[in-house]
Amino acid sequence: MAGSWGTLRAVIMVALLIGGAAGVQGLHEAAFPPPAPSEDSLYITSGATARRLAVGYAALAADLYWIRTIQYYGGIKLQLDAARTDAQARQVPGADYRLLYPLLDLTTSLDPRFNIAYRFGAIFLAEPYPGGAGRPDLAVKLLEKGLAARPDKWEYMQDIGFVHYWWSQDYTAAAQWFDRASKVEGAPWFLRSLAATTLAEGGDRRSSRLMWQAIRESAEIDWLRSDADRRLEQLDAADFIDQVQADVDRARAAGTPVTSWQELIRARAIRGIPVDPSRTPLELGADGIVRLSPQSPLFPLPQEPKKALPASTP
Amino acid sequence: MTGPIGIVALNVFRESVRDKVLYNLVFFAILLMGASYLIGQLTAGQDVKIIKDLGLAATSIFGLFIAVFIGIGLVSKEVEKRSIYSLLAKPIERHHLVVGKYLGLVLTLAVNLGVMAIALFVVLAYLRYVADPNAAAGWDRPALDPRLLEAFLLTFFELAIVTAIAVFFSTFSTPILSAAFTFGFFVAGRFSADLRNFNEVVTSPVSSALTTAIYWMLPNLSQFDVRAQVVHGVPVSATYMAMSGAYALLYITAMIVAATAVFARRDFK
């Protein structure tokens, strides 16, 4: 009995002392604020050196670098999203995502079969600034590195095609990569038609839809799948906005004032306030232009790729 | 296990249990459970891959510490505490003692690895249970992949070699030096492939012959690291496993023979 009482007393004393130490630490930090975290840096930039330092635990080191990549990308993106002005955005440390490629390069050098690092990493790199680094060239470089490690990965070829399609608007290169991917054993049938459609109708919304459906079907993780779903909904929203805009333009031509939905409803030009696929009402500007509401989860609509020039155009 | 070797081995195992060596299993379980909770929120859908990597790496690291820090004291502790006199007064040969001590620690390691494998599979089963079926369909390999056992087996071979090296050094050196030598051999063994290519960058035939000789003498431990392949579902052939097992057996035997030879000549007066 005396022994257990002694143990309890010791536990209480330790808890009180640690609580006291934490309190003093809090006061210390209030009096002398700790320095802000310095800008992210990489101490090791060579994949070969990192492999040696990992002493046989390279896969685990790759996981750690992958987690760091996600934190780095997510951290900067969140800060950029929160910045209201360009000046504020420029204050975000490392706002240009300069460490993104070196981190992904290290991750994939440590574990050359780290599939998601290639596929996700290419998205982070290719996406235009501030959503990503705006470096489609590095995205292609990363995916080509993945292909060197696994030459049978048609998904990487497909992704290179997407980068060329969306971010470089090089439809010929995109079609070539889709075609190359379609020839790999086990590749899905739609890649062949994707190659043909891209070449014939690059930049067309129909081919964009086909492209996102392809991404959705080959997505290996939820994030990619839900991103593709969102892009498809954005395309639906763009189609619907075109349709509503046509109704508005017709009403204007008929002499109806087009400054609010109520006027158009009264004139029976439309049945009710139109809503986008997320059920958020569309906005009608004073200039008579129909737009997606900034409150919509689909906002902003992506810039559509430039339309491919017909083959006969000089 | 009967006979003097078996008795010594069982005593080493019992001593490890008494010394709370198996407590590391609790840390291992906590590490895996904590990681599985945290990692899911940090890794963008790669939790199963990372738990497999972490589980296999932790198995190897925990095992390495057990092999080195217990292995180096197996013989030297008996000498230091002078209990070697009472041991050798019993109807026991010196080589029985060395082999028995070695087998006892290998048994401890086998039990450790076995329990760690079960713990890893339990955590993976939980992750499989809570995972979205669409996400699970995108995994390189299923969560409960029996191929993980190949990595466990090769890790066991590697640790058995490291234990043999630790026991060898413990027959004639102090525990601190034995630990340094064994870690040195472990690191060199992991990098031995570099030595093989060394003669391509040196012009001196003597240096080339020396590095080649060192390459063949050092334990080639990199062959036992198939963790990354297994996690990504790259097949490890039965021939590869068998040849690695045969290599481990021969190297261990060489180390134990050397250890018994040194120990047999030691004068304890």
Image (spheres, coloured by chain):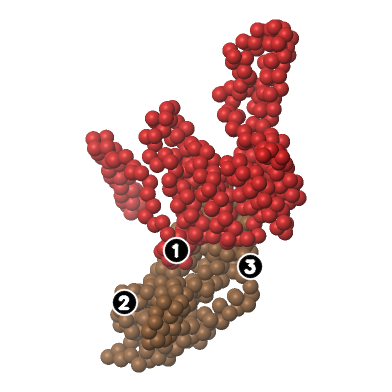
Chain colours: A red, B brown
Marks 1 and 2: which is nearer the front?
Answer: 1
Quarter of the image where the C terminus of chain B is located: bottom left
Answer whether residue B86 is visible to the viewer in this image.
yes
Q: CA distance from mark 1 to mark 3?
A: 24 Å
Residue corresponding to mark 1:
A48
Q: Secondary structure at mark 1?
A: helix
Mark 1 is on which residue type?
Ala
Report the residue at 65% width, 44% height from top: A171
Report the residue at 32% width, 40% height from top: A36
Q: Secondary structure at mark 3?
A: loop
Q: Secondary structure at mark 2?
A: helix
Viewer-proximal residue among A141 and B223? A141
Mark 3 is on which residue type?
Pro
Q: Chain of mark 2?
A: B
Quadrant housing residue A45: bottom left
Mark 2 is on which residue type?
Leu
In the image, is A247 to the left or to the right of B252? Answer: right
Evaluate whether label 1 is on the same chain as label 3.
no
In the image, is A2 to the left or to the right of A202? Answer: left
Residue corresponding to mark 3:
B235
Q: CA distance from mark 1 to mark 2?
A: 31 Å
Q: Reply above or below: B147 against A246.
A: below
Q: Do tag 1 and tag 3 residues touch (Cβ < 8 Å)?
A: no
In the image, is A274 to the left or to the right of B178? Answer: right
Residue corresponding to mark 2:
B177
Quadrant housing residue B167: bottom left
Query: Which numbered disc covers residue A233?
Result: none
Report the residue at 49% width, 42% height from top: A133
